[in-house]
Amino acid sequence: MSACNKFNLLSTAALSVCAIALTVAPANALPGQNINTVLNWAKTRPQLSALKYNSEAHGYEGRNGNLYFYVNTTSQNGTVTKEGITVSDDPSIKFTTNNAKGVKLLQNIYNSEIANDFRNSRSVAKVGRDTFSRGQKFAYITAAVQNGTNLQIISLNNLQSEIKNAKYCQTHQCDL
């Protein structure tokens, strides 16, 4: 086999692997990404409604039935710092690592990699109603809220500052 044919064969194989990887790996909208990526991703998720900017909340939000989804950003066109999901009026869904329906919802919205990261995360702190957990890829804040359950996804780098802020807000007036 000539060197040119070997090169063409290797090039074709490499391109095939890239094409398969791109079709198998779904796009994810997660902390650290640009908000435009998240907005485009949200349009492809049947569980989510269109997200609209809320200047008071410094982020985007949308409601689809009993599911409320929100994204905090550094600015209207900035980087995602936190994402959250609240499910109300369905006592069978809890965002806990051992609740199959909550984990399945995460898998349906994101993918099995994120669902497994959450399921395998370790609780590191509890402050008030919030439980802070560390996964391999992201950190998670879960809470039982009035008539429902809430999950926030944050970057691992922000976990300690979120815990510190929650502790501060236990004894001081904080804007939520």
Image: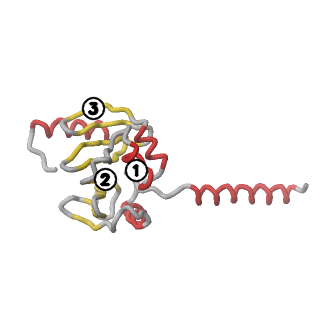
Which residue, as the protein is rendered here, is positioned at the far right? 1
Residue 54 position, x and y percent, is 22, 64
Find the distance from the CA under tag 2 to the CA under tag 1: 9 Å
* Tally of numbered discs: 3
Q: Which residue is mark 1?
A: 106
The answer to the question of whether label 2 and label 1 lie on touching residues, with beta carbons closer than 8 A, is yes
112 with respect to 159 (left or right):
right
| Label 1 secondary element | helix
Q: Is residue 73 visible in this depiction of the protein?
A: no
| Label 2 secondary element | strand
Residue flagged by tag 2: what amino acid is it? Ile
Instruction: Indicate which disc, 3 or 1, sits on the residue closer to the N terminus.
Output: 1
Quarter of the image for residue 35 reads bottom left
Front-lying residue, 32 or 154:
154
Q: Residues within 10 Å of mark 2 (few under 14, many from 20)?
A: many
Residue 38 position, x and y percent, is 39, 61
Find the distance from the CA under tag 3 to the CA under tag 1: 22 Å
Q: Which residue is mark 3?
A: 125
18 with respect to 44 (left or right):
right
Residue flagged by tag 1: what amino acid is it? Leu
Q: Residues within 10 Å of mark 1 (few under 14, many from 20)?
A: many
Quarter of the image for residue 68 reads bottom left
Residue flagged by tag 3: what amino acid is it? Ala
Find the distance from the CA under tag 3 to the CA under tag 2: 20 Å
**Which mark is on residue 85?**
2
Front-lying residue, 134 or 156:
134
